[in-house]
Image (cartoon, helix red, strand yellow):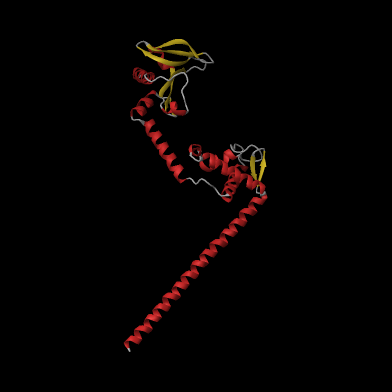
Amino acid sequence: MCRIRRFILRRALLYCTKKPCPKLVPRTGDEAVRVNCFSVRLDHREEDGLRVSVEKVIEEGVSGLVWNGQRYQDECSIPNRNLMEYNFRSRHFLGQYSFDYESPLKLLFLEKIYTPRVNIFRDKLGQRIFNSKTPVRTSRIELLKKIIDYQFENKNNPDRVYGNSDNGITSFEIIDRMYSYRIYDHPDYERMKFDLEMNLEALVDSGDLIEIRRDYKVSGRALNSLSAFELENRRHSEQILLSWILALLTLALVVVGAIQTYGTFVVRVGN
């Protein structure tokens, strides 16, 4: 069993070292789009053991550079008989994405069935759908509802992530919770962020929000504004319903009148 595991580990190391990464891997711009490389290292299982960045797989074992606390510098080699004393770590940089592996078998299997590329395709498709369906603008009332919900969620949560002062929440955290991480790749992100900040300022000016060191917190007036909006919205819906009822009644009267007129006409013709 140990020989099989060592064989799989060597195969994974060989696979990774065929596409080594440069010292600095570009993560933005056109150069990042063309990236396709692996960084791979072996960490000794002991707490103060060696951490080796693998560069070559040789017949006797592997060779690479040892981490000295600041960078990988000193050359070293690990013989085959000692390979199983180390934990496998690898990262595949593919375009602007990266995929981490801690199992050599998992790396070989997922790479052979092109799982990273499938995941990239799924993510890009999801981003395209998000971009096409997400509205660029959000009404002030919808924004106020969201902030009230966030503050209620955070009120009694000692491990809350959002907000730094009195259950407040920043504009970045609001937009992140409203749209998820995909918002940052939306083509109109800057416009949406600007629109959000303008709405926040308007809500502060109206007294619905309180701004504390760039954190926003709902005030008591916010509930009154929300209640007034819902009341107005309900009245508007009732007016629309009443208009439809009147329209249907008018149509019914017209139909009845047309039937009576037709019946009278038929009787006269018959006589």
Pick whichever, 234 or 247, lies toward us.
247
Please report the residue visible at 63 percent of the width from the left and 52 percent of the height from the top: 223
The image quadrant of residue 64 is top left
Please report the residue visible at 63 percent of the width from the left and 47 percent of the height from the top: 202
Location of residue 217 in the rendering, given as x and y in whole percent from the top left corner: 64, 44
Q: Does the image show residue 98?
A: no
Instruction: Examine the rendered structure and indicate whether residue 34 appears above or below residue 244.
Output: above
Location of residue 167 in the rendering, given as x and y in whole percent from the top left corner: 64, 41
The image quadrant of residue 266 is bottom left
Which quadrant does the C terminus fall into? Answer: bottom left
Q: Residue furthest bottom?
A: 271
State left or right for residue 5 relative to residue 142.
left
Please report the residue visible at 43 percent of the width from the left and 40 percent of the height from the top: 128
Location of residue 143 in the rendering, given as x and y in whole percent from the top left corner: 57, 47
Which quadrant does the N terminus fall into? Answer: top left
Pick whichever, 270 or 125, lies toward us.
270
Pick whichever, 47 or 91, lies toward us.
91
Please report the residue visible at 39 percent of the width from the left and 78 percent of the height from the top: 259
